[in-house]
Image (cartoon, rainbow, N blue to C red):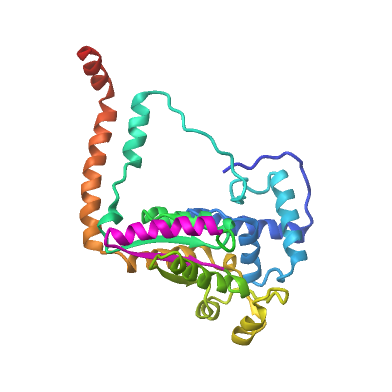
Amino acid sequence: MPRITYQPKDFQPATQRIIDIANDICAQYADQGFDLTLRQLYYQFVARDLLPNKQSEYNRLGGIINNARLAGEMDWDYIVDRTRNLRDLAHWDSPSQIIDAVAAQYRTHRWANQPHRVEVWVEKDALIGVIAKAAEAEDVPYFSCRGYTSQSELWGAAQRMIRYEKAGQKPVVIHLGDHDPSGVDMTRDIADRMALFGAHVTVERIALNMDQVRQYGPPPNPAKLTDTRAGAYIRRHGRSSWELDALDPSTLDRLIRAAIERHRDQEQWDRDTQAMNAQRSTLARVARRWAAVEAMVNNAE
């Protein structure tokens, strides 16, 4: 991971300590295959009682991390911005290279033979990287709702769920969101609008729930009193709210995988995976022997 010095800087001991702790936290998660957003890193500090849960402290940490990266004190790959990404087409140096890549990416529709059809939805874009790691490992589609899901997107999703039903499968949406007035209500909203559009979907909220708040102890925030749903929320849960970002990424990963596994016939999955891997091996052999394949095709013309 790169540490590049663009602007050398001598940090005060207290600031250097924050940088060192940030590097330790990020390294621990990198070893598990996770990168972090700045907010996720901040919540790791708060959870360890190293910083108070205040917007001013979040801003201060952001400034320290920015300066540390410019000074070559922190790896650039540790902190990511998942809301701004360059998009490009794939390119290849040779036909054998693309066939080799296709062999690695080749997947059959293993969920097509399952009794359930599962998707993972998350409230906010900033957590899509955490969701992706678990969902892709289990070959499940995933989606960032960005708050309340748009009418167009939800209608399209309902049509997709109806197709699953017609194929004899039971659709399941695994939903994750903040535990605040709107975040809790979003799960209800997805279920209600799915039903309105004629889709019979099980919407399973796996995080963030009150039992997890008690178990993992994420730092609280005041419930947003300007939210029109605040009154009902406060009567039921009190005046504190909690952000999904505050949960450890590995905990989120574990929760998602466990929820997916509950809806999967593992024996059928293993049979379909074995068949898929056999076909993938055939493609890999073609890539390794591409020169012979190319010569055969050219000689046949």
Magenta part of the chain: 150-177
Toward the bottom, the furthest residue is: 235
Is 280 covered by the magenta stretch?
no
Look at the image and say whether residue 154 sits in the magenta stretch: yes
Q: Residue at x 55, y 53 (%)?
A: 35
Relative to 83, say whether 257 is above or below.
below
Q: Position of residue 15 (x, y in %)?
A: 75, 58
Task: Give residue 218's position: percent from left, percent from top.
Answer: 59, 73
In depth, the one of 24 and 275 nearer the eye is 275
Q: Is residue 3 left or right of residue 114?
A: right
Q: Quadrant of the C terminus?
A: top left
Q: Name which residue lies at 30% across and 50% down.
A: 109
Q: Left or right of 135: which side holds 10?
A: right
Q: Can you give x and y, in whole percent of width and height, for residue 169 in the image?
A: 29, 62
| Figure quadrant of residue 1 | top right
Residue 131 visible, this orientation:
no
* Nearer to the camera, 80 or 167: 167
